[in-house]
Image: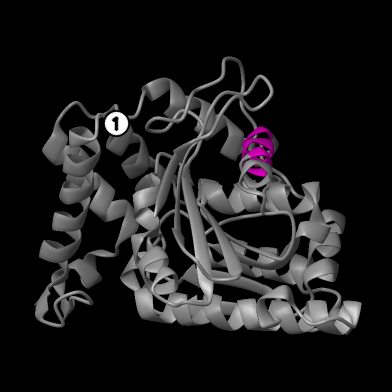
Amino acid sequence: MAVGDLGEMDARGRLFFRVEGQGPTKIFFTMGMGGSMEQWEPQVRHFSRNPNFTTCSYDNRGVGLSEAPSGRWTTKDMALDALSLLDELGWKEEVHLVGLSMGGMVTQELALLDLSRFSSLALLSTIAGGMGSLGLFVLSIPTGIYTLANTFLSSNPQQRLANGLKILYPEEFLKGVGVNPESGQMEPNLLRFRRALIDRGKKRLAAGVPALPLSTVFKQALAVATHHVSKPRLQTIGGHFGAGVLVVTGDADILVHQKNSAILADGLMADSASGSGELLVLPGAGHGANEQCEAEVCAAIHSNIERGQRHREQQSGLPSLSRL
């Protein structure tokens, strides 16, 4: 495992990142608002154990040990950060993109910065932005946005933890039981996911990682509110990736309305001549679908990578580097 702190990226600051695995197929993960790279643990664990894959996850600007540039931030600014990180890693071709929530918005902009570098695109619990998407987003104010605000603004650690769980996982799910993928044992979902959040916080604290500043929350929130990838731009993205497009949504997500995922998928998959991607709706899943439905999401990302590789081969007439 390589843990790094990227050098100066123009005037934008430094990013903290983690590379795991040694395989030829490269996956680049971008997390959402207020989230850290540890929230990709289920996917990083799944893929880095496979000798065919190498993964990179990182903390966005202003999160953890990544520096926080001054001024207003946009999702394109954060995409430029990510592109600089990819350049530093030498990941110049056949990279597979995965983004969640705000990270999915950043990933849309990242894809547009250098389409030829990327082979597949997976967007989880996210939106394309614009008035239509934001209108649906506003519908979540009584539950999702109110809970999200209290998660970051509360001075009570226990209340922040409770709100964080509510944001990520539906109440009915937390009342149930499930199999711990590490131990193979059944245990209450609330206990398992609460422990995971606490353990991550303790590990970051022990490593000297600072708490999330409110300034980062506000700047990320503004970036989310002003994010917009128009339908023509979505069609450009979808036309490049063809069948290598995956949109994942939980039908119990209190932040991202299921219709927003349909809007995103429609825009990306409008050009059926390039091959159809996948809109995966996970019954009973919340905003943290990548952890709640770990097996399903990992399998869907894996299948999407394979579709993206086949599409690239068909378009270029050459075998994927990861198949050589």
Left-right relation of 184 to 241: left
Quarter placement of the C terminus: bottom right
Instruction: Please say if 316 is above or below 7.
Output: below
In this orientation, does residue 278 appear?
no
In this orientation, does residue 188 appear?
yes
Determine the image quadrant of residue 146: top left
User: In front here: 191 or 312?
Assistant: 312
- Neighbor class of circle 1 (other Cα within 10 Å; few <14, some 14-19, many 20+) is some
Q: Residue at x 36, y 54 (%)?
A: 39
Say if the magenta span includes residue 64: no
> Which residue is situated farthest in the top direction here?
70
Residue 255, given in percent of the width and then of the height, sits at 44, 53
Q: Residue at x 44, y 77 (%)?
A: 50
Instruction: Please say if 158 is above or below 121.
Output: above
Secondary structure under badge 1?
loop
User: In front here: 292 or 5?
Assistant: 5
Q: Label 1: which residue?
A: 209
| Magenta stretch, residue numbers | 77-84
Quarter placement of the N terminus: bottom left
Left-right relation of 158 to 1: left
Residue 295, given in percent of the width and then of the height, sits at 37, 80
User: In front here: 264 or 298?
Assistant: 298
Instruction: Please say if 250 is above or below 62.
Output: below
Q: State whether the magenta stretch is mostly helix, strand or loop.
A: helix
